Image: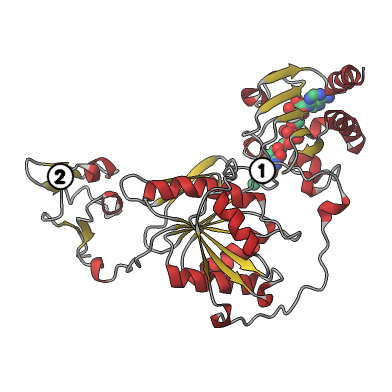
Amino acid sequence: MNEKIIIDDTLCSLCGVCSTACPFGAIALSEDKVVIDFSACTLCGACIDSCPCGAIARSEASQNAPQIPDSSGVWVWGEIEPCGRLSPVVFELLNIGRKLAGKRRCELGLVIVGHNIAHLAEEAIARGADRVFLIDSPRFEQFIEENHAEAIAFAVNKYSPEILLGGSTLSGRRLMPRLAVRLKTGLTADCTDLDIDDATGLLLQTRPAFGGNIMATIACPNHRPQMASVRHKVFPEAPADSSRKGEIVTIDSGEIAINTLAKAIIERIDESAECEMPITEADIIVAGGRGVGGAEGFELLRELASLLGGTIAASRAAVDAGWVPYNRQVGQTGRTVAPKLYIACGISGAIQHKVGMQTSEFIVAINKDKSAPIFDIANIGIVGDLFEVVPSLIRELST
Ligand SMILES: Cc1cc2nc3c(=O)[nH]c(=O)nc-3n(C[C@H](O)[C@H](O)[C@H](O)COP(=O)(O)OP(=O)(O)OC[C@H]3O[C@@H](n4cnc5c(N)ncnc54)[C@H](O)[C@@H]3O)c2cc1C
């Protein structure tokens, strides 16, 4: 293989970033140039990605290297809830989007698709969007993910944002992968952190990997936009400022071809309407795990939650046992929550559970085992039997 790394000396500023970035110690700075030790170089490309001057390339592959299209701007997908409001995750994405746009020195956009939604554009501007790309048509009144993906792809192809963020909500999970396929780019789903790499300007997308045992940071160097979805409650909401000014760009939806198998949604069944407060909305959560011992044990937790004005949640062990429904599950394969108070009863604190609740403002853990990992992140730890501790809390609160 003749491929090798080449450095364009006319572009190189001798900053040394490539030398630091090389995981194999194959790059050194001499007095007036960068020197590569080809016996140590594995062609991994870390130096190319890190170079702020664009001075490093692969010799052979450079002709075949993907052309990165010109793009600018951080966009957020303005998900609309069935009731017609912007989803709270949109405000959270506008908050982190503002920070990313600041680092990239570009504008923050919001793309929104639906019918009679101009008022939502104003709300997004108040929450930090500089420009709102509005696709407002009766054709998009219902959220049919293929149609909405087509519409957003049309807007993205026209305005070429560099980054596109959406919520890892039920609708986001249906829309974002379809959109990524249409745009021929990658998607990092379920991110728990986003940042900009200072050296390359790339979006750094961090998410749990390998069953939650490690956090992986993923970049998308060769395709645009860089797409990530983020769970609800990972970032705080952008504050509203009604004096903010922005621009609304209306996109002619007549130009958007839609050709979907689903023609209309006949009925929507909203599970949340039938049960308790959604755990993602609750300020106070009393959560139970295997230690609760059964569905009856959750009645005790429900009593405590109701006295505190909160709701109940559960670990996967309790959900798998059928004691509570799946929409109560907190963790990697459940919901992410960030209440003001999280009381964990009989939950050991496995990493897959912690990733779903560790950003709670105040954590109380009740567990018989003083070495349970949940105590590592608890603000208050009570070592004891939950069937003694919870009733005594209920007694205290009832008097
Ligand atoms: C890919 C993958 C995804 C996963 N996703 C999730 C997820 O989304 N959410 C999730 O929660 N888990 C998830 N898990 C499972 C996770 O690894 C743990 O198995 C699970 O969280 C354990 O639940 P637990 O803490 O209720 O049970 P256990 O680990 O069995 O802990 C029970 C605890 O109760 C305590 N206890 C027992 N009796 C009492 C009592 N009377 N009073 C006080 N304390 C008592 C015990 O000391 C113990 O610490 C996932 C696992 C994998 C591999």
Which element carries disc 2, helix, strand or loop?
Answer: loop
Residue 255, above or below 237: below
Residue at (86, 31) in percent of width and height:
301
Residue 12, above or below 264: above
Some atom of ligand 1 lies within 8 Å of the CB belonging to the residue at label 2: no
Q: Is residue 161 visible?
A: yes
Q: Residues within 10 Å of mark 1 (few under 14, many from 20)?
A: many
Q: Nearer the viewer, residue 138 or 145?
A: 138
What x and y, as percent, mark residue 64? 28, 71
Q: What residue is shown with label 1?
A: 336
Residue 223 falls in image quadrant: bottom left
* Left or right of 232 in this view: 245: left
Q: Quadrant of ligand 1?
A: top right
Q: Is residue 206 visible?
A: no
Mark closer to the chain start, 2 or 1: 2
* Left or right of 299 in this view: 36: left
Q: What residue is shown with label 2?
A: 14
Q: CA distance from mark 2 to mark 1?
A: 45 Å
Residue type marked 2: Leu
What x and y, as percent, mark residue 385? 83, 20
Residue at (17, 51) in percent of width and height:
38
Residue type marked 1: Thr
Q: Nearer the viewer, residue 1 or 232?
A: 232
What x and y, as percent, mark residue 142? 71, 71
Residue at (39, 60) in percent of width and height:
72
